[in-house]
Image (cartoon, grey):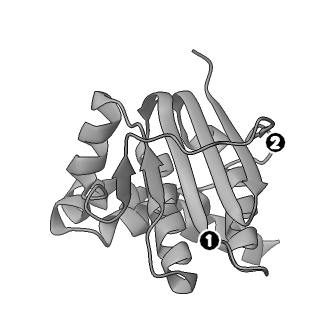
């Protein structure tokens, strides 16, 4: 199944659907769109993420979901809702500690008929990946250990990019 992310908004609710093997490559547009909408009016009442057709998700996508939850909780008293996560995705969500932060449901709310496919245009840079992993690292000491080497490499890349920019 092809990697794809879909987004829709209806009645002040955000709907995200992921299919296939979701990686960082498809996440930048999703982050920008959801974060922008969460910070505008009228307020979003619910955020639903359908994982029923998601075969696997990488740590960047999981970090993005943590970021959505953190941002949504600033404006709402309830977390985002993860819908129909399969066994593989549930194991990943439990391993990083996210399953205890969000609402997990096997009930599919009525998703809009038309959803926009997003996530194919904006390149992902080290800062984006680092931000997603920082959100994961905040969840537990285990995640700190799990992602410390990646954090170090990404921080070095960002430092090098800044140094290169300063020289120009």
For residue 108, say whether it is visible.
yes
Secondary structure at numbered mark 1: loop
> For mark 2, does the 10 Å Cα neighbourhood hold few (<14), some (14 to 19), or many (20 or more) residues?
few
Residue 45 - label: 1
Towards the viewer: 32 or 47: 47
What residue is at 43 percent from the left and 40 percent from the top? 58
Towards the viewer: 17 or 97: 17
Secondary structure at numbered mark 2: loop
Of the residues under marks 1 and 2, which one precedes in the sequence? 1
On the rendered structure, is 127 left or right of 66? right
Q: Is residue 30 above or below residue 164?
A: above
Towards the viewer: 107 or 134: 107
On the rendered structure, is 47 left or right of 87? right
Q: Quadrant of the C terminus?
A: bottom right
What residue is at 28 percent from the left and 55 percent from the top? 99
Which residue occupies the extreme top position in the image?
A: 1
- The location of residue 129, given as percent across then percent down, is 53, 56
- The location of residue 96, given as percent across then percent down, is 26, 54
Task: State the image quarter where residue 3 is shown.
Answer: top right
For residue 156, say whether it is visible.
no
- The location of residue 14, given as percent across then percent down, is 67, 58
Q: CA distance from mark 1 to mark 2?
A: 28 Å
Give the residue number, with chain letter if any, for mark 2.
121
Q: Is residue 136 above or below residue 50?
A: below
- The location of residue 62, given as percent across then percent down, is 43, 51
């Amino acid at each position: 199944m092809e990697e794809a992310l879909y987004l829709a908004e209806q009645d002040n609710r955000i709907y995200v659907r992921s299919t296939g093997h979701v990686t960082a490559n498809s996440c930048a547009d999703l982050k920008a769109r959801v974060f922008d909408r969460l910070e505008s009016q009228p307020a979003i009442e619910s955020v639903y993420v359908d994982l029923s057709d998601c075969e696997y998700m990488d740590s960047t996508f999981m970090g993005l979901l943590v970021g959505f939850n953190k941002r949504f909780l600033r404006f709402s008293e309830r977390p985002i809702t993860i819908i129909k996560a399969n066994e593989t995705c549930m194991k990943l969500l439990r391993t990083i500690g996210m399953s205890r932060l969000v609402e997990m449901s096997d009930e599919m709310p009525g998703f809009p008929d038309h959803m926009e496919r997003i996530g194919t245009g904006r390149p992902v840079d080290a800062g984006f990946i680092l931000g997603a992993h920082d959100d994961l690292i905040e969840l537990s000491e285990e995640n700190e250990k799990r992602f410390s080497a990646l954090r170090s490499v990404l921080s070095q890349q960002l430092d090098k990019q800044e140094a290169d920019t300063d020289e120009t």
